[in-house]
Image: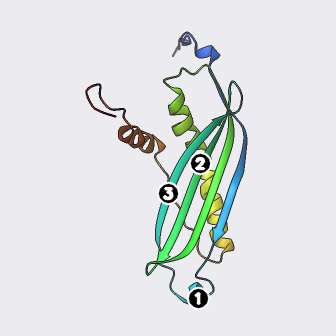
C-alpha cells in the first residue's frame, strides 16, 4: 500500500519540545507516629495534594515543578507525611500563547509524575512502611477543573 507523506502544517517545523533536565527540587519526609506505627496494622487513609508551578528561565526554557504532598492518617492521626517537588527543565519553542498553559500544566507534569511517584514510594520504603502506589493523575482534568474555578467574572458581574 502506497502512503503519501503528510505535509507539516505551517509553523509545525518551528515547534520544539524537549526535556533538558529532571531533578528533585525539594524533599521532605516525616514519620511522627514512629516507632509506635510499626506495631499496628498498616491501613492508612491516604490524601494526596497536587500542585504545578512554572518559571520561565529563558526565552524558550521553562522550569516546571510538580509538587506532591502525601499524608497518611490512621485513626485521625498523621502517621506519614511526604512532600516531593519534582522539577524539570523543558525547552518549548513555536507554541502559541493559547496552547502554552496546556504544555506547562498538562504535558510537563504528566512527564514528571512517574518520577515523583517513584520518589514517594522509595521514601515510604525507607521509612519502613509499604509503598503507597499512587494512582496516575489526569492532569488534563486537574487543569480543566482549575480553569473552571478561576474563570474571570462576566462583563456585568462585579469582580
Q: Where is mark 1, residue-wise? A: 36
Work out whether residue 129 or residue 84 is closer to the camera in this orientation and state it. 84
Question: What distance separates the C-alpha of mark 1 from that of mark 2?
Answer: 32 Å
Work out whether residue 85 or residue 139 is closer to the camera in this orientation and state it. 85
Residue 8's image quarter?
top right
Question: Which residue is located at x 61 percent, y 39 percent?
Answer: 54
Residue 133, visible in the rendered structure = no
Outermost residue to the front = 158
Question: Which residue is located at x 62 percent, y 76 percent?
Answer: 31
Question: What distance separates the C-alpha of mark 3 from that of mark 1?
Answer: 26 Å
Left or right, 14 with respect to 98, comes to right
The C terminus - image quarter: top left
Q: Earlier in the sequence, mark 1 or mark 2?
A: 1
Question: Which residue is located at x 69 percent, y 55 percent?
Answer: 26
Residue 59's image quarter?
top right
Q: Secondary structure at mark 2?
A: strand
On residue 117, the disc is none
Q: Residues within 10 Å of mark 2 (few under 14, many from 20)?
A: many
Q: Is residue 51 above or below residue 134?
A: above
Residue 93, visible in the rendered structure = yes
Left or right, 21 with respect to 132, comes to right
Position in image of residue 127 (x %, y %)? 66, 75
Q: Are marks 3 and 1 in contact (CB under 8 Å)?
A: no
Q: Earlier in the sequence, mark 3 or mark 1?
A: 1
Q: Where is mark 3, residue-wise? A: 49
Q: Residues within 10 Å of mark 3 (few under 14, many from 20)?
A: few
Position in image of residue 2 (x %, y %)? 53, 13
Q: Where is mark 2, residue-wise? A: 66
Q: Earlier in the sequence, mark 3 or mark 2?
A: 3
Amino acid at each position: 500500500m502506497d502512503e503519501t507523506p503528510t505535509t507539516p502544517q505551517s509553523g509545525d517545523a518551528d515547534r520544539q519540545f524537549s526535556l533538558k533536565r529532571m531533578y528533585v527540587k525539594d524533599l521532605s519526609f516525616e514519620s511522627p507516629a514512629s516507632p509506635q506505627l510499626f506495631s499496628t496494622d498498616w491501613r492508612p487513609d491516604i490524601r494526596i495534594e497536587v500542585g504545578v508551578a512554572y518559571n520561565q528561565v529563558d526565552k524558550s526554557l521553562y522550569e516546571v515543578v510538580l509538587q506532591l504532598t502525601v499524608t497518611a492518617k490512621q485513626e485521625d492521626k498523621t502517621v506519614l507525611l511526604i512532600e516531593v517537588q519534582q522539577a524539570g527543565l523543558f525547552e518549548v519553542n513555536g507554541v502559541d500563547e493559547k496552547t502554552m498553559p496546556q504544555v506547562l500544566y498538562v504535558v510537563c507534569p504528566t512527564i514528571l509524575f512517574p518520577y515523583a511517584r517513584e520518589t514517594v514510594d522509595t521514601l515510604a520504603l525507607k521509612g519502613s512502611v509499604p509503598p503507597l502506589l499512587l494512582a496516575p493523575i489526569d492532569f488534563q482534568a486537574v487543569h480543566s477543573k482549575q480553569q473552571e474555578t478561576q474563570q474571570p467574572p462576566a462583563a456585568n458581574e462585579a469582580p
